[in-house]
Image (cartoon, rainbow, N blue to C red):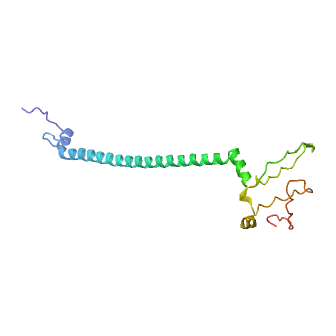
Amino acid sequence: MNRKPRLKGRAARLARLFPAGPRQAARTPFVLLVVLLLGGGLIGLLVLNSALSEGSFQMDDLQKDTKSLTDEEQALQRDIDSYSAPDALQRRARELGMVPGGDPAFLAPDGTVKGVPSEAAPLSPAESPMAVRPPEALATDAPPAQTPAPDASAGGAYPAAPVPTTAPTTPGR
């Protein structure tokens, strides 16, 4: 006998809309969907892996550049330190014909002068640098010219600077 109960009325009309035989899902579309999802996932992983490895190579190149620039910066800093050392500054100042200054005088906030200023000692001919000779002395191989005598009226070790003849102008006038 038939194990299914007979439907009546509205239930019978609804039952006619569905197939009466055993239901079997179509396997082909499901299998294709799964294969497409897996293939898309693998291709996505491949693209992601390639992008990460490219970024890794770029990062490695940038790290090498950073290291070389850091080494160059340290070398330049060592050069700066060697040029700014006190003995190097003194040597270069002597090459330019500079002499150590005399005793300084200081002004107090109330306007009084503290200390007695003294002039700088001139260089002896043995200490005169060869690089400071005037061009005419180089041509004749004569000994270098002496530094000018101090200007007593200016109170300094060197003659007073010339005074400009024109009045300074302010911008916008």
Q: Nearer the viewer, residue 68 or 139?
A: 139
Relative to 47, say whether 144 is above or below. below
Please indicate, yes or no, whether residue 2 appears anywhere in the rendered image. yes
Question: On the rendered image, what quadrant is the N terminus found in?
Answer: top left
Q: Nearer the viewer, residue 39 or 129?
A: 129
Please indicate, yes or no, whether residue 26 appears anywhere in the rendered image. no
Left or right, 155 with respect to 62, comes to right
Q: Which x, y percent locates residue 63?
A: 47, 46
Q: Which x, y percent locates residue 95?
A: 72, 54
- Residue drawn 79% across and 65% down? 172
Question: On the rendered image, what quadrant is the C terminus found in?
Answer: bottom right
Q: How many dots with numbers?
A: 0
Q: Which x, y percent locates residue 125?
A: 78, 54
Q: Which x, y percent locates residue 71?
A: 53, 46
Relative to 95, say whether 9 is above or below. above
- Residue drawn 44% across and 49% down? 61
- Residue drawn 71% across and 58% down? 131
- Residue drawn 27% across and 45% down? 37
Left or right, 50 with respect to 137, comes to left
Q: Nearer the viewer, residue 44 or 144?
A: 144
Seen as rendered, the residue at the extreme left is 1
Q: Nearer the viewer, residue 18 or 90?
A: 90
